[in-house]
Amino acid sequence: MQGVWTTARVKAAEDRLLARTPAGDLMRRAAYGVATHAAEMLAGHTGGVAGRRMALLVGAGNNGGDALWAGAFLRRRGVGVTAVLLAPERAHAEGLAALRRARGRVVTAEHAQVLDDVDLVIDGIVGLSARGPLRPDAAALVDRVTAPVLAVDLPSGVDPDTGAVDGPAVHADVTVTFGCRKPVHVLAESRCGTTVLVDIGLRPELGEPDIVVLDRVDVGAEWPVPGPRDDKYSQGVTGVAAGSATYPGAAVLTVGAAVSATSGMVRYAGPAGDEVRAAWPEIVATGSVADAGRVQAWVVGPGLGTGKAGRDTLAEVLAGGVPTCVDADGISLLAKDSGLWDAREPGVPVVLTPHDREFARIAEPKGVTLGADRVAAARELAEVLDAVVLLKGNTTIVAAPDGRLLANRSRGSWLATAGSGDVLSGLIGALLASGMDPWLAAGRAAWLHSLAGELAADGAPTSASAVVAAIRDAVRQARLGAVSP
């Protein structure tokens, strides 16, 4: 797992590290990392380093100092460096002196034309303490930039803890950060470009991360596969209560994902049995939850409808005493009738998988608002409802009732297609049935769902049916990655 730490935690850790580090040492170490990656960008874009031209956008404070020191290091490699000072009277003194000693050029914002003929721009406008969009003078400079951009720590104008963009902000090609990843690098990945981590010795000071990000090993090594003593029951039986006469496809997709995810068994309960059996003959289909037989987990909601029949089905599933993933119409029913929660046996895990509109429906009656801070909203709702909340988005947030947080960065936007959420629910249900921790089940399912979407798309628009068909390849790739050297 990769760790992510909030800016408050990072600042506290930096203060502890600075207290036992010679003055200026950490900044020079960080700036050398910036210079190294800037040189790589120059070589990649222009074929060389010496003789190339670069501009620094320098604000007040330490981020500006990092940019200035990086410029000084790059001057030693023959790069023509011009620093554009947005606040000359508050520029980092030691960094500015270092650049001048290296014979770098220093101008003020009135000389914006220097940005018109450079090979790279380093964004050192603001750092982790800043909030809100760029000020007009900085925004005017950024608007003028056409060269690739390397951001120091974060793209200026993007909120470091929420990733929100409320106005003018930098769009970086590469972001070089120090010591650890911050929320912005996960929540606003499209703004950061490629995030590169430079080790400055901070990790021992940080403690446990605030958010974790799963990787291939975390998913592949723990994905349920049969052992020599397993049978179809021991691996977990997934129940699916989904679909209706109007929306049989939701049932087909949810069941298909559950069938494809693990080697256990899937029972379907609902009115779309004929359609489901035609697509997935290996399942057992019945007309109702009561007739479905024993399961280790349920998925309920996709295409279920929000009338009395759907409500009764949801209530029966919640009373079943097994881990349950509630999606789509199931979430709408819970939002409309809070009494449905009374059917849930105390302590039985529930995973909710809302998109933004569904989140608002179920959260606002509880006093939880989905604003710019999506992580805080998901965490609060998970605590209020005592449920795992998977908030869908380009970066999916998974919050557990005990405060654990997980983020899954999407591989593009291919999953923005009808039925994609039904596929995710089926994956979660299969992992719940295997006995996996519900928070990790939701996170691992989201990770694999994203990979399956990428494989299904292969560079072109795809469909939910194709995503289901790609699940086995996604599992295979995850498992191979987990055991490779």
Image: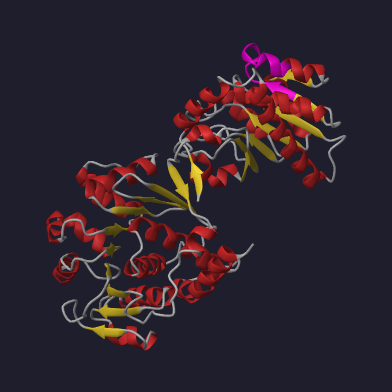
Q: Position of residue 295 (x, y in %)?
A: 25, 75
State the image coordinates of residue 250 (x, y, percent, origin top left). 34, 73
Can you say whether 310 is above or below 174 in the image? below
Front-most of 38 and 332? 38
Magenta span: 83-96
Q: Residue furthest top?
A: 89
**Quick check: 170 left or right of 120?**
left
Q: Is residue 114 on the magenta stretch? A: no
The answer to whether residue 425 is visible is yes
**Does residue 461 appear in this view?**
no
Quadrant location, the C terminus: bottom right
Q: Is residue 197 left or right of residue 95?
A: left
Q: Is residue 41 left or right of residue 385?
A: right
Residue for point 64% across, 23% down: 64
Q: Position of residue 217 (x, y in %)?
A: 53, 59
| Relative to 73, 301 lies left or right | left
Residue 235 or 103: which is nearer the viewer?
235
Q: Is residue 86 on the magenta stretch?
A: yes
Which residue is at 15% across, 72% downward?
309
Q: Is residue 117 above or below residue 109?
A: below
| Residue 45, image x, y percentages | 78, 46
Which image quadrant is residue 254 in?
bottom left
